[in-house]
Amino acid sequence: MTLLLLGGTGEAKQLASALHGLGVPLIYSIAGLVRTPALDCEVVTGGFRQFGGLDVFIKAHNISAILDATHPYAHKMSQQATLSAKNMGIPCWRFNRAPWQPQADDNWHEYANWQALLSAIGTKKSVFLSAGQLPPAVCEGLSAYAKDGQRQLLRTALNPTTNLPKNMTWVKAIGPFSQQAETDLLRVHKIDCLVSKNSGGAATWQKILAARALNVPVYLLQRPLLAPATEEFNELKSCEDYVAHCFKKTNI
């Protein structure tokens, strides 16, 4: 019987390494678009369509439980995980790292969707977008501001998947980043607005610290609502202990 660990985050890699070391049989799944981690356990890249879908993969590989440790905004994969677990009669556990919390000297604005967020930044002069790939509709909205002279800086780990506004500069980079580097970037580009997702974790936290130090307002896209998992965790050790205990106790 095998655990399917849905990864793509630093925490997922840590869980995979720890659980494998504790003798939990597992398969680590990752999209593999940026990089594939070096792990001692079996690693599957490229998603589940190549296998006929997640349900088929679960049956073919004798998966007895799913641990969803994907990015907090990977809602499509998380939703599919809970659905497939229900279809196949197995538990779906979720590790979801805690979101960032504002401090007294932060200037944060949170929005439920891109449309609301874009409506709020139209008067900004220089916008830094550090929120992953931008959907086509978002780029269309930003194009209108670019025509009005707004400068836009986009940073992603992969090449953009859609056409970018003419006034947008794209930078390819993969975290973690230092606070000094983030501060320098904000200063060089005279950023007066940071757009981000509330991803949590340490890999991109330094941009928030840089914005705080320079009094740059932060516009955050709220996390998507997910269907409840069988068990949910936001602390690595408690998640690791629970999963290891379940496999040792019941040999699921």
Image (cartoon, rainbow, N blue to C red):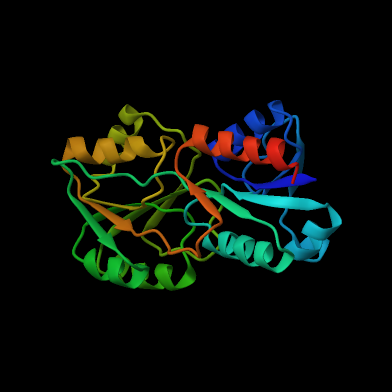
As drawn, 147 above or below 190: below
In the rendered image, residue 249, in percent from the top left (x then y), is placed at 69, 38
250 to the left or right of 188: right
118 to the left or right of 31: left
In the rendered image, residue 139, in percent from the top left (x then y), is placed at 42, 67
- Count of marks placed on residues: 0
Tell me which corner region of the image, top left, top right, bottom left or bottom right, holds residue 203: top left
Whether residue 234 is visible, yes or no, is: yes
140 to the left or right of 211: right
Camera-side residue of 208 and 76:
76
Outermost residue on the front side: it is 249
| Residue at 83 percent of width and 52 percent of height | 61
In the rendered image, residue 35, in percent from the top left (x then y), is placed at 65, 40
| Residue at 64 percent of width and 55 percent of height | 91
Camera-side residue of 59 and 210:
59
124 to the left or right of 68: left
| Residue at 82 percent of width and 52 percent of height | 62
| Residue at 29 percent of width and 33 percent of height | 184
Whether residue 187 is visible, yes or no, is: no
Quarter of the image for the N terminus: give it.
Answer: top right
As drawn, 90 above or below 235: below
As drawn, 2 above or below 112: above
Camera-side residue of 208 and 8:
8
